[in-house]
Amino acid sequence: MQELVDFLNGLIWSPALIYLCLAAGLFYSLQTKFVQVRLFKEMYTLLLSGKNSKQGISSFQALSVSLSGRVGTGNIAGVAAAIGFGGPGAVFWMWVVAFLGAATAYVESTLAQVYKEVDGGQYRGGPAYYLEKVTGQRWYAVLFAIATIAACGLLLPGIQSNSIGNGIELAFGSGSLIETGMGVFSQAKIMTGMVIVVMLGFIIFGGVKRIANFTQVVVPFMAFAYVLIVLVIIGLHITELPSIFMMIVGDAFSPMAGVGAAIGWGVKRGVYSNEAGQGTGPHAAAAAEVEHPAQQGLVQAFSVYIDTLLVCSATAFVILITGAYNVHGVGETFLVQNIGAEIAANGPAFTQLAVDKVLPGIGKPFIALALFFFSFTTILAYYYIAETNVAYLRRTLKLPDFTFLLKVVLIAAAFYGTVKTANLAWGLGDVGVGLMAWLNIVGILLIFFMGKPAIKALKDYEQQRKTNPESYSFDPVKLGIKKAVFWEQRLEKEKAKK
């Protein structure tokens, strides 16, 4: 199984996808005139100004749902893997893909808003919806929906729950071994898996509103607590920070593991963490209640900064400052070995050991707790994304509603992921992320050449912004944007009221 997964990842995560992610981010940064820099202040203002409705959630709730997908095990275990396999220079490429990816996040999230629909009393949207409406290639949209259901409903939850299980085991011990039909597993992992199953069942059977309400409380709180702890550690070693920063930059271009490894692992784990271009973020963006599609695009671009430039950077600095990492070479060799060879890079151990070096007895359980909430809310986000694509297939192919089956499969996948090996869990997750990224990035690049809807929306928003209006409006017909039915109908209703 591991060999098959590694083979598939070799095909999917070829250099072509690595450079496609970077090229798409650069392309849209240029097309938007680096919107991620120009409108940074506006992003923050919009984040706090949105309101929810019966059909939609607020901009902040949408940000929390998408951040719950972004801020997860990738920020703790993913950063460790990037360093462990790509060297410290991989962190630099995580920064690059985050900065450029903020423009990609703006584009895909704005598209999700432009082409969203009302389904079952709530807003629905995402890549499947905008790919169908703009390209007219329904088969391509259906392919994305199927790939997303498989990735978010089956493959990706295992990464999150696996990291939770590994973190709990390292912090509190494995307990006795229990023999099951699937193999022999530690008591700690089985108990952790059962807790995850119960909590997941309670929340995902409550619908998107319950998911949004849970994540808007948990994600900001845990992100703040986590960043506060690591900033304290960085502050205690502040004199070492300049040399660490120079090591990251220097290793990015002449790294110990080779330029290809640093770029490859930095981009792969960067895309996994911040999800820009992956196609997951737009689903939550479409659910937001906003006056203009560009507003939610800007809010989602801001979330990339929070994820990578803040949380991931904090993790990387702590690992590198404390030296709690190894860098793997070819086969069983190490290019750098600071800790035991048995400690896996594909897991939270580097981060736990790093924090525990400075805060003995506190670091391991604290990271385990942070990882639990980060990863758990990410699984919730995965469910919402998969559910949205189930709704799309139901609408498009007239299929029966299999949402209940999705819930059961996702919960089972999360439990299984808790107890299986880290390498297999990450490998399966990488297959899912890679497939979605290929389909979505190619799709949004094609959409640019078929009407530039996201760019037109940005120009329209900026023109209105110059007049300092009390409220914004969006007229897709006036802008030459076709099939934005939701916004056309909203405008007609607003005119009728007047």
Image (cartoon, rainbow, N blue to C red):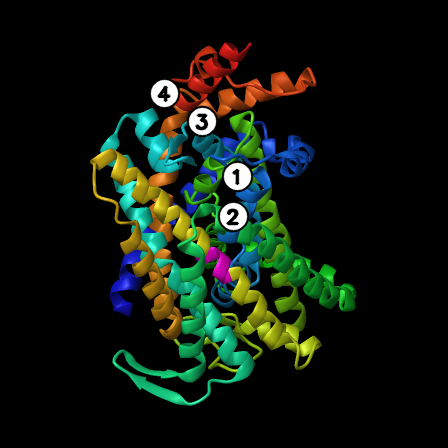
- In the rendered image, residue 15, in percent from the top left (x then y), is placed at 38, 49
- Name the secondary structure under disc 3: helix
**Which residues make up the magenta segment?**
375-379
Q: CA distance from mark 4 to mark 1?
A: 23 Å
* Image coordinates for residue 261, horizontal then vertical, percent: 45, 59
On residue 212, the disc is 2
Identify which residue is drawn at 47% across, 43% down: 281
Disc on the earlier residue, 2 or 1: 1
Rendered position, 266 above or below 133: below
Name which residue type carries label 3. Val
Name the residue tied to disc 4.
483
Tell me, yes or no, if residue 264 can be seen here.
Answer: no
Q: Where residue 7 appears, x then y in whole percent? A: 27, 61
Residue type beneath disc 4: Lys
State yes or no: discs 3 and 4 in contact (Cβ < 8 Å): no
Tell me whether the residue at label 2 lies in contact with that at label 3, contact meaning CB atoms closer than 8 angstroms. no
Question: What residue is pinned by disc 3?
Answer: 114
